[in-house]
Image (cartoon, rainbow, N blue to C red):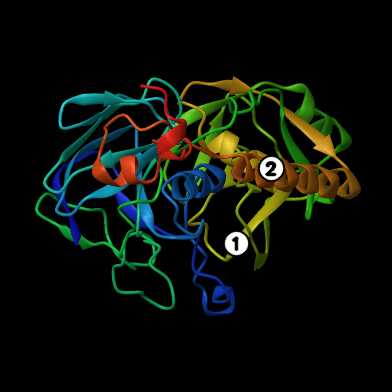
Amino acid sequence: MSLTVLQPGPMVTVQDAGRFGLRDSGVSAAGPMDAPAHRLANALVGNPTGAAALEFAGMGGRFRVETGCRVALTGVTAPLEIDGQACAANAAHRADAGAEIRIGAASDGVWGYLALSGGIETAPLMGARATHLRAGLGRALEAGDSLPLGATDPQAPCLALGGPLPDESGPIRVVLGPQDDRFSDEIRARLSDAEFTVSSKRDRMAMVLDDVTLPAEHGHDIVSDGTVPGSIQVPASGQPIVLMAESQTTGGYAKIATVIGPDLPRLAQMATGTQFRFAVLTRDEAEEALIAARSAEAERLAALRPQAATRLTSEFLLSCDLVGGVWPGDEVVP
């Protein structure tokens, strides 16, 4: 059971939930840029939400499944075809053995996810299957690569969302610190008053922001300390840098604020050139936002429902009540 890469799009990598517990050794978690979209893709095909799936940037490419399975595309709106048949995103679809999967260019979002039932079962590296390009753990996929897939139940249903995904908008929320005291009151106010632009200088490690500078009156260099995804570092140029999934574990630039966990995927999905604002929360408000986001996601995954079968397979027919009842022969009216 395997998936063959025929023609990969940009930055196609294998990503599971991430590689945790190694930051003290200088290895950050990596994992998906949009973790909720990654979890949704896995849930739609019946996998554990942390199973390994494919992540791509902007365009997926072409793949062939060597065994029948269920597939789902999430994270972006992009043309999805299975053996030439158009299929919707955010829903699972059946792919027969030998089927070709095509994923075109995204019309919204940046990071897309293709999950396959059974999950991708490449050999774990340091306890995870997540590709960490900066650390040299795995690599971007190339044409001809073959990825092993886990076992799948051919009779399991294809799942779909029970309702539309939330329309998330508004400012990107942050908590000040840990070095916001190195910036003047005026610059801290600029953080939430100004409009920033997503620059083309971006990858899985970090995103540089344009149009606004945040000079530190007490100097930008600090004794190197811990960083996390979402840290907003400000180097001597004053141009803010938001750290992402493959962020380094320590850094020597002052960090004016940190993007809260629920909003970091939304920032990652913003197209180059997108303008946005930050909004400052207290730590208590940030914790409440995280709890609310986790609760909403749990409800969304619990509400996934089987789709009506598009093909009358033997497995589907055997799962249906095609009789509806049994009556004694002498009660049947000729």
Q: Position of residue 223 (x, y in %)?
A: 68, 67
Quarter of the view holding residue 193: top right
Q: Is residue 54 left or right of residue 183?
A: left
Q: Position of residue 85 (x, y in %)?
A: 21, 25
**Distance from Cα at disc 1 to Cα at disc 2:** 37 Å
Q: Position of residue 133 (x, y in %)?
A: 35, 59
Q: Is residue 212 above or below residue 291?
A: above
Furthest residue to the front? 330
Q: Is residue 19 above or below residue 311?
A: below
Q: Is residue 214 left or right of residue 332?
A: right
Q: Earlier in the sequence, mark 1 or mark 2?
A: 1
Residue that appears at 41% across and 30% down: 308
Mark 2 Cα within 10 Å, few/some/many (few <14, many 20+)? few
Quarter of the view holding residue 192: top right
| Image quarter of the C terminus | top left
Q: Is residue 77 above or below residue 257?
A: above
Mark 1 Cα within 10 Å, few/some/many (few <14, many 20+)? some
Front residue of this view, candidates 262 and 247: 262
- Name the amino acid type tagged 1: Gly
* Residue linked to disc 2: 299
In this view, the mark in front (1 or 2): 2
Front residue of this view, candidates 22 and 46: 46
- Name the amino acid type tagged 2: Glu
* Residue linked to disc 1: 251
Residue at disc 1, secondary structure: strand
Q: Is residue 246 above or below residue 217?
A: below
Question: Is residue 260 in view from this perspective?
Answer: no
